[in-house]
Image (cartoon, rainbow, N blue to C red):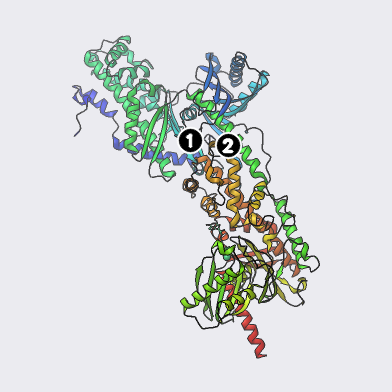
Amino acid sequence: GRSVPRWALTSHPQVQRALLELTVSLETLHEVKGHMLEAMAKGLSQQTHEEATVHMLPTYVCSTPDGTEKGEFLVVELRRRHVRTLWVTLPGDGNQNLQLKDQLFDMPEDIMQGKGEALFDFIAQCLCQFLDGAGLSNPQQRLPLGFVFPFSCRQTRLDQARHSQQGARPVQHRVPTARPCSPQGELIAWSKDVRCSDVEGHDVVQLLQAAINKQERYQVDVVALLNDTVGTMMSCSTEGMPCEVALLADTGTNSCFMAEGCHVEIVEETSGRMCVNTEWGSFGDDGALSSVLTPYDQSVDQESQKPGHQRFEKLIGGLYLGEIVRHVLAKLAAEGALFSGTAAPALGTKDVFKTQQVLEIIDDEAGLAAARNTLQALGLAPSEQDCCHVQQVCRAVVTRAAGLCAAGLAAILSYMCRSRELERLKTNVAVDGTVYRGHPRFGEILHRITKLLAPECTVTLVPAMDGGGRGAAMVTAVALRLAAQRRELDQILAPLRLSIADLQRVQALMRREMDLGLNKETNAQSSVRMLPSYVRNTPDGTERGDFLALDLGGTNFRVLVVHVEKEGVRMASEIYAIPQAIMQGTGEALFDHIIDCIIDFQQKQGLTGQVLPLGFTFSFPCRQLGLDKAVLLNWTKGFSASGCVGNDVVQMLREAARRKQHTGLDIVAVVNDTVGTMMSCGYDDPSCEIGLIVGTGTNTCYMEEMQNVGTVEGEEGRMCINMEWGAFGENGCLDDIFTDFDRMVDEKTINPGKQRFEKLISGMYLGEIVRYILLALVEKHILFRGKPAPKLQTRDIFQTKFLSTIEIGADGPRCACSDGLALRQVRGVLHELELDASFEDSVLVREVCQTVSLRAAQLCAAGMAAVVEKMRESRGQTQLAVTVGVDGTLYKLHPRFSQHLQHTLRELAPKCFVTFLQSEDGSGKGAALVAAVQCRLAQAQGQQ
Ligand code: ADP
Ligand code: MG
């Protein structure tokens, strides 16, 4: 077991009792940690923030230094009796060779108790005096300044970086601003003996800025406001090991840490992280510390300026430790347990026992002598044993303070670990303050107890260096770095952000192209082909029979057998790969391969010898001359087999069958996958009159009035038109929508200049667009700290499915979101690409993905708006209710695409009520259903 503590051997029962009162067991510290966690949660929550004892104030510091910070910065640090001004030069070398010039100005006592205006005028004068002596080469230079103001402020913003997240709504092109927005910080209440009038409730940044401007001497912009805790944290970050927590054990005590943005509910922000200033000094003001408080603490509290307030601080802060010891000693002396029973009136006076002395007395070597000196200076005559007892009391008070600090720190660490959904957290903790620095014992206990209370966290305590100066310069530099990055990112992404007006223009252009394409005379001028499909009827549900279906036109080739029965549709299918060599080889080889697959399928399914009607989903632009006659106009989506364009695909398939001596094929219909999708959804929902694909490529078909179809004889009824809208824009009509990134993607495809609309929307291209944007960001040193990212140079390395992974959880409902998890996904993806992404990198990459997928969905909506509006008009209806059958992995698996699509469509076509119905295997089932409808009609005709 444990050895008996030395104080237990003391002969005086009163001394023993006092020491016991000051001892906080590990179990109690666990409880304190638990209460602190509750208090933190209360402070962070929107509902309970106002009444919380631990305020958890957002600081708008959203990033720790990454070493690239560069430039010259001014800092003004307000202290209790001084104003300190600094000039800091960061060379951008990882903050190794930071240069710093500073000056300390004494503050006349009356200023801190006088008018606020006089205080800020004094600060401004100090600053000007400092700059006068700084030898500025250009006195007109604009100087960014960070203001260290160590009092509780309600901050509202530091820069605009966090205010430009895009939502689901189409956003206007934002005009990037030249500088970060100035911060705002309203003083909640003075503390630490300061009482200036007309400052509480006012924005201290504005007060300082106005005072500086009033001097009319220098061009200074206050760009950051921070307290000393945040500065302490920021001064301790080293490259590769960010410091995300700071703890001050000073005159008072406080802490801050980087919290997940989505947990800081009082800030309109859901992504990234933000430093939260806990203001934990007031922890316990609601009674949470009652199991710890002793009669000595009650006396200290009663004699303080604000009884009942700052209860945690009064157990830890340097303003109070000496006072606690004094009360213990006074009581012991009164009980006759010290000084041979003589009275000790000196101990009745407030503040005679300084914390500095307490910290000297606890020392093993010089402690006893320090105790003797201190007591003698108070006119007392201590014995050897008195000195020992005083030392024990001092140690108990310091040990308790360090233990309580550890409980608070453990709460923060466990909270961080939990909210980031980590099993283990490893972090640096910046520590500073007179109590911490006063004796190594404090830090030792703090570290040891923290480990016991938060065993899942590995912590390195880093003694801070000049948090108020150096750290403030870092905060200022980081604010400017983020603002500059934001500006550049916005400039790069601005062309991809489409306004409602842009989308309305795209909609109108699509409509124009549709009209041109349907007209026989103008058909050739349109980039949207508007191909008649010869499908005139959607299923009516009476279709029956067994059918074969083929699905060619994307990632996979499939053969299916489809049984259409009274009970519904059953099917079986096989997937066959089409090797790239065949996709891009000869047409004969391609169709031979298809026949081989059919033969294999029929064998596997026991269908050899049966002749079933076959529907062929062939998802490339075809000029159809009948339901079973389709001339290929051009390849898309990576296909380029020779000798096919201009030929009838049914004919080519029949010829291949002949070459392979396969006789059992009865090809009834060729359909596009959009048509197949519409038909298969139409089987379940008769109002499904539109088909949409968003997969490898994108395309749409819809039921058009025959009288509008100038390219086919006849005026009666409707016909399904395969728009081939992927080609929209090939005639240049979308040129001002394309960005440099789109042009780069287009140039590297096998069909440059073609399928321009598709290349903005579909799965084959979105990843590539993102890749080019990321390359631009790397080049501009906005991502990965400017480190090169060679793997990103590889084509198609950034897959479109990554967008889905990365955007999962983004913009999720507040706090139900697990932003930490989502951003870890981003890092996972980037890690796969051998990219060493910081947390901020992940946030940026996600924003790029969001921008690209949002644009894709919005453009798709603009096209769809043109379709539904046209249908509504040609039917002469004031409102249209219609269903769209949809297929395609991008649509189905991307977490936001369909939402964005539907939202934008409602905005662009408010008179249309559009339901989206995902098709189950649309292209396979649909082809069979086209064949089935055809067979039904043929039968009906035969019976007539
Ligand atoms: P096709 O259109 O060729 O018939 P799909 O509908 O399966 O095939 O679409 C394939 C496309 O879907 C590919 O371009 C791929 O990039 C994309 N994709 C695959 N998985 C995902 C995903 N999880 N999120 C978004 N897109 C995806
Ligand atoms: Mg498909």
Q: Is residue 52 above or below residue 473?
A: below
Q: Earlier in the sequence, mark 1 or mark 2?
A: 1
Which residue has dot 1 on it? 55
Specify the quadrant that holds the N terminus: top left
Tell me the kind of residue under disc 2.
Answer: His
Tell me the kind of residue under disc 1.
Answer: His
Mark 1 closeness class: few <14, some 14–19, many ≥20 residues within 10 Å: many
Of the pair 613 and 897, the residue shown nearer to us: 613
Going 61% across and 66% down the picture, which residue do you hit?
586
Q: Which residue lies most toward the right here? A: 521
Q: Which mark is residue 739?
A: none
Measure how far apart labels 1 and 2 are at the Cα level.
Answer: 37 Å
Q: Quadrant of residue 582?
A: bottom right
In this rendering, the label closer to the viewer, 1 or 2: 2
Of the pair 555 and 406, the residue shown nearer to us: 555
Q: Can you give x and y, in whole percent of width and height, for residue 796 in the image? A: 56, 52
Q: Quadrant of residue 301?
A: top left
Q: Can you give x and y, in whole percent of width and height, for residue 879 in the image? A: 71, 66
Q: Quadrant of residue 283?
A: top left
Tell me the SS state at disc 2: loop
Specify the quadrant that holds the C terminus: bottom right
Mark 2 closeness class: few <14, some 14–19, many ≥20 residues within 10 Å: some
Tell me the SS state at disc 1: loop
Which residue has dot 2 on it? 781
Q: Is residue 424 above or below residue 237?
A: below
Query: Where ligand 1 lies, by image quadrant?
Result: bottom right
